[in-house]
Every structure is written in C-alpha cells, then in structure tokens.
Image: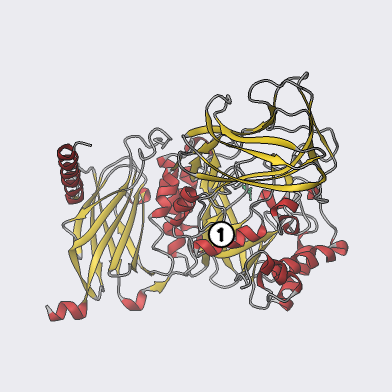
Amino acid sequence: MDLKHSSSTAIFCLLLLFCVGCRCWPLEIEATQTATLKVDASPQLARKIPETLFGIFFEEINHAGAGGIWAELVSNRGFEAGGSNTPSNIAPWSIIGDDSSVFVATDRTSCFSRNIVALRMEVLCNDCPVGGVGVYNPGFWGMNIEDGKAYNLVMYVKSPETTDLTVSLTSSDGLQNLASAMKTVSGTSNWTKVEQKLVAKGTNRTSRLQITTNKKGVVWLDQVSLMPEDTYKGHGFRTELISMILDLKPRFLRFPGGGFVEGEWLRNAFRWRETIGPWEERPGHFGDVWHYWTDDGLGYYEFLQLAEDLGAAPIWVFNNGISHNDEVDTVAIAPFVKDVLDSLEFARGSADSTWGSVRAAMGHPEPFPVKHVAIGNEDCRKKFYHGNYLKFYNAIRQAYPDIQMISNCDGSSRLLDHPADLYDFHVYTDSKTLFNMRSTFDRISRSGPKAFVSEYAVWRSDAGRGSLLASLAEAAFLTGLEKNSDIVQMASYAPLFVNDNDQTWNPDAIVFNSWQHYGTPSYWMQTLFRESSGAMIHPINISSRYSSSLAASAITWQDSENSFLRVKVVNFGSDTVSLTISTSGLQASVNALGSTATVLTSGNVMDENSFSNPSKVAPVKSHLCNAAKQMQVTLAPHSFTTFDLALAQSKLVAEM
Ligand code: AHR
C-alpha cells in the first residue's frame, strides 16, 4: 500500500469529518412562517417518563425471524414444511442429478418423533456425474457466505452401508466452491449426528449448501442446520440486525407477534411448548396468517434470551384460545390457561421447578423476568374474549400477583368492563390522521388502566415503502405519547423487520436481505426518541399562525456525562419556519459547546431509503452554536428536528 497516499487520505478524511462536525445550525434558509415555542423547565412541573416508554414489537412476519434475525441459513431444515403426509414437497431443497442418477423422496422414518419426516436419497448411478448427485438448500433467497468466516453444519444421517458425503457451500449455480468437506458415514441402521465446520474461502451473497455423493446406495438425511459461527453473543441472532435494534435502545420486547400468535386457525397458532428444547426435536409450524413455515429455531426461549441480550423487558403475547377464524369456548379454556401458566413457570420458575428445569437444561438456570403478558391480540370483539380473558387473568393474578396484564380492549374510547393493568392500542392510518392523533391521549381519563400503544404506523399511499412523510406523522404522534406518558406506559412501531424477498406487510422499520440492511425514515425517527424513556418531560406551548402544522415536546435527559434539554419539533407543513425557542425555569445554564441539532428531512416528502441509498433520509447532526435559553432556529419544510441543549450544572456554573 502507498503509505504517503494513505496518510494524506486519512488527513483529508479527518478534515472532512472536522468540517462536517463544525457545521453550525441554523443553516441559512429563508423562512416563510414564524413560531414561538416556550418550554417551562421548572422542576415542579416536570414529570418522569416511564422507563419503559419506547420499546420494540418483534413479530414473525415478513420472514423477520426465520430468514431474518435468526441466523439459521437452512430453510426447512427438517423437511417438515411440506406437511407430514409423504411424499411431500421438499422446497426450497432441490435435487442435484436427474431421474437416472438419483431418486429423492420424503418418508416418515426420522429418529425425531415430533418431526417424523426425513429425506430418503437413493443414489442410482454406479458412475455418477462429476461432483456427484444429491440435494442442495438455497436458504432464504440465498445464503450470505463470507470469506474467512466459519459456518457450523450439523445434520443427521442414516446409511445402511458405509458411504461418503461431500458437504459444500457453493454459488447458486454450484460452480463456485466456497468451502467443502468429505464426511464418511459408517454403515448402520441408526441415525448419526454429523458435524462439520466449514470455513469460506470466498464471498458469495446468494450461496447454497450442497450434500452430494458419488456412491450408489441409500442415504437418509434429517435436521440439517448451518449456523454462522459469529452470532450476537453466540445466541444465534444475526449480529448486524441486532445492532440496528440496539441503536433504538428498546426498553421492552413485545413478542412473538400479533397475527402470528393468533393464527388464521388455532391449529396454526404459535404454541410455545412446541418451540422449546433441543432444536432438532422442534416440530416447526406453518404460520398461516403470514403464510410461511418456520422451523421454530427462534422459539419462546430464544425470544426471552433476545430480550435479555437487548436489556429489554420481555412482553409475552400469548394465544388466548382465539384465532382469526375459530375460538375455544370459555367452558373448555382450562387447558389453555394451564398451558400459559406452564409458560410462565418456564420463564420464571426456579431451576428445580417442572418447567424451570427445562429452561435450565437449555442453558439458563436464572429465571427470565417476565413482568408483562398480553392476553391475546386484537381479539376484544370475539365471542369468547371476555370469558377467556377473565379465566387467564384470574389464574395469572393468583399465581403471579406482580405480572401486569394487557387487555385487547381499547380503554381509551370507553371504560373497560374487566380488570386490566394495561390496554392495547393499535393504529395504522394515513399521515394526516396520525399527525392529528398527537393529542388523542390529552382527552383520555387519567384513571383506569394505562395504554400500551403496541402497534402504530402510517401506512398505504402516504407510506410508500417507508417515506419521510410517514416518519414525520409518527414523530408527531410520539411527542403526544411522551406528553401523555402519565397514562401511556409503552409504545412500539410495527412491524419492525422485513426481509425484502417477502414483504407481506408494508411499511416496516428495518429492511434486509441475506447481506444488506437499512432503516426506513420511521426507523431513524425512532432513534431520536431513544433517550426519552426515563427522562423528564416539561410542558411546552407553541404560538404561531402555523401551529396546526407543528408538533413538539421537551425533555431533559442525561448520558453518562452530561445533561441535556432536548426540544423536538416536527414541521409537518411545506413552509420553512423561523422558530424562537425560549426556556424558563431551567436550573442550569446552557452551554453552546456540546449542544447539537439533529434533523431528519429530505428533498421530497415521499423520499425513501433503499439498499443502494440507505441514508437518503437519515438524521444529520450539527453543532448548535447559538444554543441559549432563548434562541432562534430554522425548521426546514417537512422536517423533524431535535435540539439538544447541553446543560451546565448550576453548582458548576456558580463556581465558574
Ligand atoms: O403488525 C402487523 C399486524 O397488524 C399484527 O400482526 C396485528 O396485530 C395487526 O393487525
């Protein structure tokens, strides 16, 4: 490498960074509107925002988990996705060879009784084609295999006669070999667990896993797994997607879904018990609401682990005996109640309790702190909801008095006729409506259960595939939730993730494929609220002829070293605004050094991010050189701006 060239590049980059870092707010834009925003920061009017206000809702939708944050690379690893009647469809597995060289079919001979389907491969050729015959799995729209990285293959094999299997990672056409190993399987009538680490000697974003042989005979395969060695905390989560979540600093994790929990039919609903224990033994299930099979590698235990790894409170949404199309009568709900109590014992019971011991055997002797459960999802109007709800509520209250229970019935529009600690509130609407909903909770009774706004988003034409416009309305809505956080306990955007190859629900906060990802403007908007949980909120007042296009809030928050007054302002209109921010009651002076302004905007209100332009609409930070208790700033049209005023403690100020 040319050292002279590289050091001058480094100096140039440093200078560039320095200059960008020095950019001073406000930028010179001519304003057509004026407004005044008064913040009363006096301590007696400040109120603490709940520690749990902003979190995430993870649903197994859009292949968010299988083929998403769950790093398993093999799709349909147990050959169960085609159903238990054999022969069955083995997709996305495919065959290497033709009718004259290999005969591949499923049968019901697995050693795992809960997922009995296995793959039988009869090699017909004596003189097989070069490269052998066999099967390959393309993963979830291609496996991202990266140079130098290790991948752990585990598979179960049965072969009556000793045979050689070649396991390899190749390009999607099989021509580029990225890694391969030969495994000799001794002839026996028993199943054998075969393990092999494969280290890639090249990168290919759409690779496949091949299992081939040149030897005539019969081989059975089952439970074929390929996991990258490098996963978040070694717990099986895709690292770069987890870091996107971590950047939101979520205080809770609502899981494993909404519709996914309910199912179109109860027989296809999420059943926690079927998703725990050794991965090889999990039956997997077809999620009939979002129309895809999951091997349930990302099961109940893994969700609890994920919450722990994120430092987020787990919120377990369980099925209450109701799906979209069928319901369990309350007279017959008792076994479902027992099932949920077992799930809570699994999470919270001691390591020597019946279900706590299963958790301990999975590697987590300490209980998981489940303090919230949601009794179903969007089921309030269903025939047996109230009856079933009360059965679950009473049983859980008795066994776990500290668990907060969330009702599906909207307590914002009328008083609930049943006991609940929280009620669920979902809203998907157009941008104007959501912008105007910033004051919805101003009008709600201050007594009764608190709101959990567990799903909110702008959708349809205003959202595109994640527009700036959507994010502005959502930001305005969230300022309203902050202000009403005496009665709104928690809030999360939905859905969180989408695999770009299966966008069942649009829009979503984080878009990914096998190797790329980006945040939509709604994702970036949420990062500007990540300091709000646990912060102090202050009253504000906006006066302007243009105030119907503005939304704002003010908080004080602290990082590890400093305190800040953060004023957030959404300009939902198309005019530039000259805004005077004046602060009273502040117990500290404002330090321009360390004060910043961060703006989320773009040239066109319908602008979106994409794989090729992931930061087209992303927050841009600059120094707030004129930061003071009274200051004038400019708001760009269609923008969301946060002003962080660095506070110098009064004691320190007095000493200076
Ligand atoms: O977030 C997508 C879906 O919207 C959820 O599964 C459901 O709760 C709601 O209808």
In the rendered image of this protein, does residue 504 appear above or below residue 330?
Answer: above
Q: Quadrant of the N terminus?
A: top left
Place residue 365 in its image quadrant: bottom right
Q: Quadrant of the C terminus?
A: bottom left
Query: Is residue 212 at all visible to an observer of this figure?
Result: yes
Q: Residue at x 41, y 44 (%)?
A: 521
Locate residue 147, reporting x and y percent: 45, 38
Q: Amino acid at mark 1?
A: Leu
In the rendered image of this protein, does residue 353 appear above or below residue 16?
Answer: below
Which is more toward the observer, 96 or 391? 96
Please tell me whether mark 1 sits on a helix, a strand or a loop. helix
The color scheme shown is secondary structure
Q: Residue at x 41, y 36 (%)?
A: 608
Locate residue 354, reporting x and y percent: 76, 72
In the rendered image of this protein, does residue 104 appear above or below residue 406?
Answer: above
Place residue 29 in its image quadrant: top left
Locate residue 402, reporting x and y percent: 63, 77
Q: Which residue was labeled with disc 1?
A: 306
Q: Residue at x 48, y 64 (%)?
A: 53
Locate residue 593, reporting x and y percent: 17, 62
Question: Left or right of 198: which side holds 260?
Answer: right
Query: Is residue 473 at all visible to an observer of this figure?
Result: no
Which is more toward the observer, 353 or 458? 353
Question: Left or right of 265: which side holds 312?
Answer: left
Does the numbered disc 1 mark a residue whose Cβ is under 8 Å from ligand 1? no
